[in-house]
Image (cartoon, grey):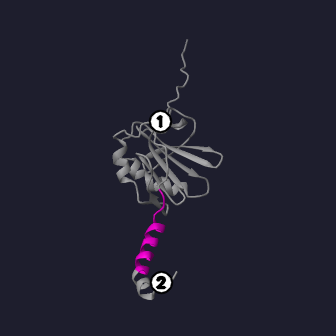
Amino acid sequence: MYLNSRSWRFTAPFAASALLVLTACAPSVTINEAKDANNPACAPMMVALPDSLAGSKRRTTSSQATAAWGDPALVVLRCGVKVLGPTTDKCVTVNGVDWVLRQENTTWTITSYGRNPATELVLEENTIPSDTVLTEISAAVSKIPSTGGCTGLGDLAIASPSTSAG
């Protein structure tokens, strides 16, 4: 096929622009929405989520009340997951938001604690700094009102045996 230089000069800039636009668009991340994803309390948090998290850009997702950062996705968020009850799992507080940390193999599931609906973060070990993620996302999660929080042994009132003179 022969292209004359005149038609090529005309179409080349458009072809290059189209290619640039297509390569810049990462596909949507498929995430199963949480059972309570339609809870209205998720909305204020979702609009407050950062555009980047620990240096990774936010991506489009397939489901309501979900978010993802990185390509491939390094952090996946779902609002409306089951609210956790009392647990002996590790619980940390970051910028006023309590989080329960659970590890299974190399996957960390970090769930907000004492907030209804709960928010879940899933990330792989050694791919993105979890402390940075929690620091940067806690302001958005704090839009969901706190109903409780982490407690430890130091927070419990331990009854001392009473002495009686008898």
In the rendered image, which residue does mark 1 sit on?
A: 82
Residue 163 visible in this rendered orientation of the protein:
yes
Identify which amino acid the numbered label 1 is placed on.
Lys
- The percent position of residue 88, horizontal first and vertical second, equals 57, 35
Query: Which residue is rendered at x = 44% and y = 49% of the image?
Result: 62
**Crowdedness of circle 1 by 10 Å Cα count: few (<14), some, many (20+)?**
some
**107 displayed left or right of 33:** right
Q: Which residues are magenta?
A: 11-27
| Closer-to-camera residue (165/120) | 120
Q: Secondary structure at mark 1?
A: loop
Q: Which mark is residue 3?
A: 2
Q: In front here: 92 or 46?
A: 46
Residue 142 among those drawn in magenta: no
Residue 144 shows in this picture:
no
Quarter that holds the C terminus: top right
**Nearer the N terminus, badge 2 or badge 1?**
2
Q: Is residue 14 magenta?
A: yes
Residue 37, image x, y percentages: 41, 40
- Pick whichever, 20 or 83, lies toward us: 20
Q: Label 2 sits on what residue type? A: Leu
The outermost residue toward the bottom is 5
Residue found farthest to the front: 1
